[in-house]
Amino acid sequence: MHKLLVAFTLGIASFSTVQAQSNSELLVSLNSGIPQTQGVAMVLANQALAQKATVRVLLCSDAGKLALKAGESTPLKPSNKTPKEMLQGLIKAGAKVEVCALFLPNADMSPSDLAEGIGVAKPAEIAGYLLQANVKTISF
């Protein structure tokens, strides 16, 4: 009977952990232009999506180049996908991807230069998002 009670308690605890994870949100802030750094950011964002988190990616500085229609990036092992391809996969899987408000004007570009599915972040909206209790952040 004691073993059954322990198993039941552990089962309930596991269920609540899974439930809490499904309400999690992750903001990935990526500034680096280094392909491996970009790649690990994409891999972790993809893993968070697979674990039912809501994922939002903010690209700025050198990482903003991933958001452009033009340009290529370096394929990474073991998947042989580029960070840009990984980013497109995140968008297709439901992640919200934006460039920071400073990227386009300082790169002499406009929203028409962005790849499909990528928008321009509004600072007030990002600040409000960051202040939500269920949002975790990771920066690269």
Image (cartoon, rainbow, N blue to C red):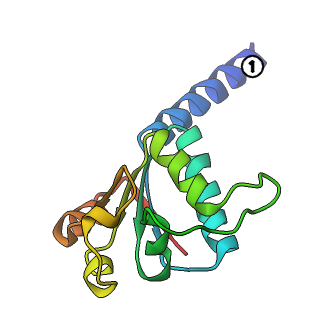
Quarter where residue 113 is shown: bottom left
| x 71%, y 22%: residue | 7
What quarter of the picture does the N terminus occupy?
Answer: top right
Q: Amino acid at mark 1?
A: His
The image shows residue 29, relative to residue 91, as above or below, that is below
Quarter where residue 73 is shown: bottom right
The image shows residue 112, relative to residue 109, as above or below, that is above
| x 47%, y 73%: residue | 65
What quarter of the picture does the C terminus occupy?
Answer: bottom right
Residue at the outermost left position: 124
In percent of width and height, residue 2 lies at 74, 19
Left or right: residue 24 versus residue 11 is left
Residue at the outermost right position: 78
In percent of width and height, residue 46 lies at 58, 48
Of residues 51 and 85, the one drawn nearer to the viewer in this rendering: 85
Left or right: residue 92 versus residue 39 is left
The image shows residue 4, relative to residue 99, as above or below, that is above
Left or right: residue 127 versus residue 85 is left
Say which residue label 1 marks: 2
What kind of element bears circle 1? helix
In percent of width and height, residue 122 lies at 20, 67
Residue at the outermost top position: 1
Quarter where residue 37 is shown: bottom right
| x 51%, y 50%: residue | 88
Badge count = 1
